[in-house]
Image: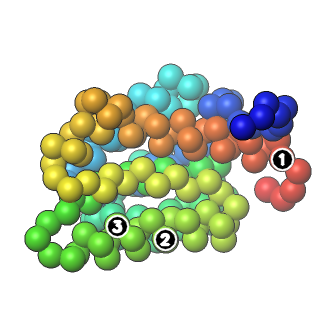
């Protein structure tokens, strides 16, 4: 891959207003995702008054809340956090796939970055490895992605 000068975003939160939608299902894990997300928001300059946390029952409900937040005009980005852990039924496939598709659709329909920070793992150990374990912290990573996208979209030509 060549070296190209181009436009990219930075995780710069200057004035950013962020909603974080969090699933209560698997709350022990999603609370850790939220802690990392809030920590990263604070580290990048988002004050508490520019941050809203919205709890939803499960990952399947994240897209609807993301849509309401994004369409409100009150937020520059929405971060969706959850943990869908594979079980013995195909429920995992339906929930994870529909949550991802819904969040993508909201971002495309509204033009507001909606970041999918939902863990989709085979077991609880894999989930814990992604909230500060050997796989990093996916709550923090979701926030950095959201802030980078806010910055990038601010600098690209077009509506918003």
Q: Looking at the rendering, which quadrant does residue 132 occupy?
A: top left
Give the alpha-carbon distance from disc 3 to disc 2, as whole Å: 9 Å
Q: Looking at the rendering, which quadrant does residue 25 occupy?
A: bottom left
Q: What element carries label 3?
A: helix
Q: In which quarter of the image is the N terminus?
A: top right
Q: Which mark is residue 96?
A: 3
Label 3 crowd (10 A; few <14 / some 14-19 / many >=20): many
Q: Residue at x 20, y 56 (%)?
A: 122
**Residue denoted by label 1:** 156
**Residue denoted by label 2:** 101
Q: Can residue 14 be seen in this view?
A: yes
On screen, 87 above or below 42? below
Label 2 crowd (10 A; few <14 / some 14-19 / many >=20): few
Counting labels gives 3
Q: Earlier in the sequence, mark 2 or mark 1?
A: 2
On screen, 47 above or below 99? above
């Amino acid at each position: 891959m060549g070296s190209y000068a181009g436009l990219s975003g930075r995780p710069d939160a200057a004035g950013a207003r962020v909603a974080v939608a969090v699933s209560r299902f698997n709350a022990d894990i999603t609370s850790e995702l939220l802690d990392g997300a809030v920590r990263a928001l604070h580290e990048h300059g988002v004050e508490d008054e520019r941050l809203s946390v919205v709890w939803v029952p499960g990952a399947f409900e994240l897209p609807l809340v993301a849509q309401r937040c994004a369409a409100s005009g009150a937020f520059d980005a929405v971060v969706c956090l959850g943990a869908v852990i594979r079980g013995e039924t195909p429920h995992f496939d339906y929930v994870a796939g529909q949550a991802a598709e819904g969040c993508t659709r909201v971002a495309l329909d509204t033009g507001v970055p909606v970041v999918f920070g939902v863990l989709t793992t085979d077991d609880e150990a894999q989930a814990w490895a992604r909230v500060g374990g050997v796989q990093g912290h996916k709550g923090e990573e979701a926030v950095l992605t959201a802030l980078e996208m806010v910055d990038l979209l601010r600098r690209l030509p077009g509506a918003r």
